[in-house]
Amino acid sequence: MLLNVNATRMELLRLRKRLSLARRGHKLLKDKRDELMRQLLEVIDRVKELRFSIEKEFQSILERFVLAKAAMGPYQVEQELLLPVKKISVSISKRNIISVRVPVYAKEVSGDIIPYGYMNTSGEMDIALNDFDKFIDNLLDLAEKEKAVQLMATEIEETRRRVNVLEYKLIPSIIETIRFITMKLDETERSNVVRLMKVIDIVRSH
C-alpha cells in the first residue's frame, strides 16, 4: 500500500532513511524475540522440574501428616498446631530480562516451624513440618518462575506483532512508495528533457 506522501526528492530521501531505520528496528526486534524465546524455554524447563519436585514433596508431606494424625489423633494434632510461632513475609523486587521486568521473591522468616514440645508428639509430625519448611522455598521459586514465564510470553507476543507489522506492512509500503516516487521523478525528468529538447529545436529553427 502506498503511503500518503508527495512525490518529491526530499520525500524520497526521507523515505530511504525511514526504510533503513525500519530494517534496523526489524532486525533488533527479531533478535530480541529470538533471545526471549530461548530464555523462556529455559525457564519453562525449570518450571517443569520444579512442579514435578513440588508435587512429590507435597504428597510426601501429606502422607506424613496423615500418619501423625493417625498416631496422635485429630484433636491433639489440631491443638499442637493451634498457635504457630513461625512468621514468613515475602518481599518482591524486580530484575530485567531483555526489557522484561520479572519479579524476584525473597522471604523474611522469624520463629521456628515447630510450635510445640517433642514430648507428646509424633516424629512424623516433626519431619512433616521440617519438610514443609523447605517446601515453602521451592513454592516461592516456582511462583517466581511461573510469573516470569507469563510476562515473557506476553512480551514475546507483543514483539512478534511489531515484527510482523514491520515485515509485512510498513517495510513493503515504504519500498512500494519509494519505487512509485522514483518512477514519478524519472517520468518528470524525461518530460523535462523532452520539453528542453523541443525548446532547443524551436530556438535553432529561428
Image (cartoon, rainbow, N blue to C red):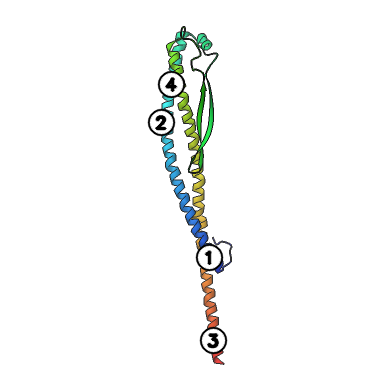
Q: Which quadrant of the figure contains the N terminus? A: bottom right
- The residue that label 4 is drawn on is 59
Q: Are marks 3 and 4 in contact (CB under 8 Å)?
A: no
Q: What label sits on residue 116 in the rendered view?
A: none
Secondary structure under the numbered disc 3 in the rendered image: helix
| Rendered position, 34 above or below 168 | above
Mark 1 or 3 closer to N-term?
Answer: 1
Sequence-wise, the earlier of marks 2 and 1 is 1
Q: Position of residue 150 (x, y in %)?
A: 50, 37
- Disc 1 marks a residue whose amino acid type is Leu
Going from N to C along the chain, the mark reached first, 3 or 4, is 4
Category of crowding for the residue at label 3, using alpha-carbon neighbours closer than 10 angstroms: few (below 14), some (14–19), many (at least 20): few
- Tell me the tag on residue 13: 1
The residue beneath circle 3 is: 200
Residue 143, given in percent of the width and then of the height, sits at: 49, 31
Question: Which mark sits nearer the N-terminus, 2 or 3?
Answer: 2
Report the mark closest to the observer, 2 or 1: 1
Label 2 to label 3: alpha-carbon separation: 85 Å
What's the residue at 58%, 66% (across, down)?
Answer: 6
Determine the residue positioned at 54% across, 63% down: 14
